[in-house]
Image (cartoon, helix red, strand yellow):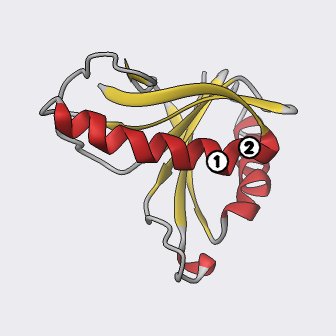
Amino acid sequence: MTAVVRGVVPAPELPAFYDRAFGVLPRTVAAQGVTVVGPAFGLYHGLPGEQFDLEAGFPTDRAVQAEGEVLAGELPGGRVARSVHAGSFDGLGAAWQRLGEWITAQGLTPGGTFWEVYLTEPTPDMDPADLRTELNWPVG
């Protein structure tokens, strides 16, 4: 189970979307007595273009009740190609491209959704080189 905020967001507005989502989610989850059980993630529906259809959220111990922008959700199950990107978020596009190329080279078919798990929480004073982001792409 996950607690998420979903949106269709133009690329330049992604940071503001994530800030808003990760601002409201902890308050709503805590108020409902639901427990966050893992790091934050961003789940993308379809390949990005000028806009991103995505969910930002946290895995939880049980479903949340829909409240305001917060909805219950879940991450996809099944076989997944996974890698970890070390460095700033600016390098994520290239990291996803490399993972997609690897999937194709293995003779696999990438799924229509994919997600990032933010293994390190960004802070204003951190070195972006210290960020670690897990990339997950379902394959068939």
Please state the horizontal and vertical placement of residue 115, each as a whole percent of the image. 55, 38
The outermost residue toward the front is 68
Q: Quadrant of residue 74?
A: top left
Please name the residue that numbered disc 2 is placed on: 13
- In the visual, does 23 lie left or right of 46? left
| Pointer 2 local density, CA inside 10 Å: few below 14, some 14–19, many at least 20 | few
* Tag 2 near tag 1, CB within 8 Å: yes
- In the visual, does 72 lie left or right of 116? left
Amino acid type of the residue that numbered disc 2 sits on in the rendered structure: Glu
Q: Is residue 44 above or below residue 30?
A: above
| Pointer 1 local density, CA inside 10 Å: few below 14, some 14–19, many at least 20 | few
For the point 77% across and 51% down, which residue is it? 93
Amino acid type of the residue that numbered disc 1 sits on in the rendered structure: Ala
Q: Nearer the viewer, residue 93 or 65?
A: 65
Please state the horizontal and vertical placement of residue 66, each as a whole percent of the image. 34, 16
Please state the horizontal and vertical placement of residue 132, each as a whole percent of the image. 52, 66
Q: Is residue 82 visible?
A: no
Please state the horizontal and vertical placement of residue 79, each as a whole percent of the image. 48, 28
Using the image, tell me which numbered label, if any, was put on residue 85: none
Q: Nearer the viewer, residue 138 or 103?
A: 138
Q: Is residue 89 above or below residue 87?
A: above
Rendered-image quadrant of the N terminus: top left
Q: Is residue 67 above or below residue 38?
A: above
For the point 28% across and 34% down, which residue is it? 28
For the point 44% across and 46% down, which residue is it? 22
Q: Nearer the viewer, residue 15 or 63?
A: 15
Please name the residue that numbered disc 1 is placed on: 16
Rendered-image quadrant of the C terminus: top right
